[in-house]
Amino acid sequence: METTNPEYFENKAETTTDRAVPKVKGNETEKDITETAAARTRGRRKIMQSIFFFLFRGAAAVNGIALFIIIFFLLKNGLSAISWTFLTQPPMDSMTSGGIFPCIVGTLCLGIGAIIAALPVGVASGIYLNEYARPGLMLRILRLGISNLAGVPSVVFGLFGLAFFCIILKMGVSILAGALTLATLTLPVIIGSTEEALKSVPDTYREASLALGATKWQTIYRVVLPAAMPGILTGAILGLSRAAGETAPIMFTGAVFFAPGKWPSSLLDSVMALPYHIYVLATAGTEIEKTRPLQYGTAIVLIALVLGINLGALIWRSRLRKRLK
Amino acid sequence: MAEKAQTTEKMMHIFFFCIASASITILFLIMIFLFKEGLPIFKTVSVKAFIFGEYWYPTSDPADFGIFPLIVASLTVTVFSALISIPLGVMTAVYLAEIASQKVGEIVKPVVELLAALPSVVIGFFGMVLVAPFLQRIFDIPTGLNLFNASLMLAFMAVPTICSISEDAIHSVPVALKEASMALGATHFETIIKVIVPASISGICTAIILGMSRAVGETMVVLMVAGGAAMVPESVFDPVRPMPASIAAEMGEAPIGSDHYYALFATGIVLFIFTLVFNIVADYIANKYRQVGEASL
């Protein structure tokens, strides 16, 4: 290393040949110069760091500002539309007044239906992936399938739901078809959170149970699942909030512009849904300007519902965790 | 007794495997139905004319089914949104993982998560009623519903995806690497740029590709904000009609079994293939260049 360093030789040559030059003084100035140069580059590097860290902070702040602006403007323009009537009455006067009660009910029906369908399948898939599967080609293919399912565009889920549930299985535009379409879309979310929850259960639990003579299934059922339950349920609720906010998959499968009455009477009824209601009022209604307050109001209700579900999930999880400890 | 328990175990294993294959079955069903309903259009138009045809007039007589403008629209919207979302997402991830104090991080992280939780229709609505008039006034353009607006809105939908996956990747860089770099006298910033980001680059790339894949497939935002004109854009302020918007807007009116209906499913095939390629590439990068400890650096 040292022998290949030209500077090393140079310095050595200098100190051996330049005997005539007053040594002490020369060395001192040289040392001064290198030190100030080092200090200068260090200063420059520090400044670079400050500039870039400022940019990083700015980038993070932009997200916060964007969220703030969105929520602020929606609240500012829409809060006045929210009232008891708005929340509890069906639309009146061909959508220009009245409330959005059927939309809230419809969204809840679709979201809960989706979770009822997706939760058992998702949890069982998660159990297989985390507890049973051995690393290998099969597991690789399964994982690729799941990640690709997660990446399918929402409108393609809508096309699939239309062709499969509505037409082939003859469900028509209905809660059932819409909920099943949403279920296929939330499945990867639930699988992911189940796996995450199962991974966080320490292996010592499994080993202790197996050492006591329990079979694998008994271990999973009696030991692993209860410990993972908070995580799994949180995942389910997050899936519900995702399903409740989706529009494109239910456009052709479950949601309609107008459904008579407050409550759907069967699973094969089509419903109104909050996201679709916003879209229709804002783009296709006959009196877009007149219904503007209703649009803002609906958007606020949807956000409140989705964020409320999210928040509820987080609180519930922390409670469950405490109780299980 | 023991034998019976073993049979139960075997059954359980097979049972769970069958259910776990549900995702892949659904993926196949999606493909089968897209092709079943989409391929008939190629009896009327050739594949080449469909993909490179410049005119999309599905309801005129005779109808034109050329989705080239829709493909171009999808790609330009995605690229422009990536120009915004990549720096924003990656920088936010670096900030969260490396710079932010724990206290600030605990505020910023939920903000990003909330951004992800906002329903797409709400972002589309926001872009339509507030951003569009604003852009129209500022830039003095005929309509605020255009390529630029759609890209901007999509960017904010892709940021959470990019940010959270990148952040995980940055977190997984071994601390020893960072400490070694700092010990050699590098500043924190130099360590981030020259050590931490290169070490987590495969995760960051995966994040970017998944973010872009989300932008390509996102429907409601482009449906409400992009303007809806099926033509190849000439400037960033031209209205466009990306593929998902076209499908979502027209499916309701296309009679089942008509050419228009088949054409929309065929558009769905193209869109599906786009996102499939994005996802497979992301998966490939994530697995191929996975950072395992310091050894492979």
Image: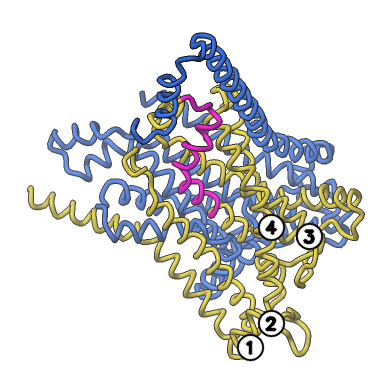
Chain colours: A blue, B yellow
Q: Which residue is mark 1?
A: B45
Q: Residue at x 46, y 48 (%)?
A: B202
Name which of mark 3 and mark 1 comes first in the sequence.
Answer: 1
Residue B220's disc number: 4
Residue A119's disc number: none
The image quarter containing residue A85 is top right
Q: Quadrant of the N terminus of chain A?
A: top left
Amino acid beneath label 1: Val
Of labels 3 and 1, the one closer to you: 3
Q: Which residue is mark 3?
A: B236
Q: Predominant secondary structure in magenta? A: helix
Amino acid beneath label 2: Gly
Name which of mark 3 and mark 2 comes first in the sequence.
Answer: 2
Same chain letter for marks 3 and 1? yes
Name which of mark 1 and mark 2 comes first in the sequence.
Answer: 1
Residue A315, placed above or below residue B128: above
Place of residue B150 in the rendered image (x, y in percent of width and height, measured from the top left): 73, 56
**Label 4: chain letter:** B
- Element marked by disc 1: loop
Mark 3 surroundings: few (<14), some (14-19) or many (≥20) residues within 10 A: some
Magenta stretch?
B185-209
The image quarter containing residue A324 is top left
**Residue A171 visible:** yes
Residue A230, placed above or below residue B214: above
Q: Which residue is mark 2?
A: B53
Q: Residue at x 56, y 70 (%)?
A: A166
Mark 1 surroundings: few (<14), some (14-19) or many (≥20) residues within 10 A: some
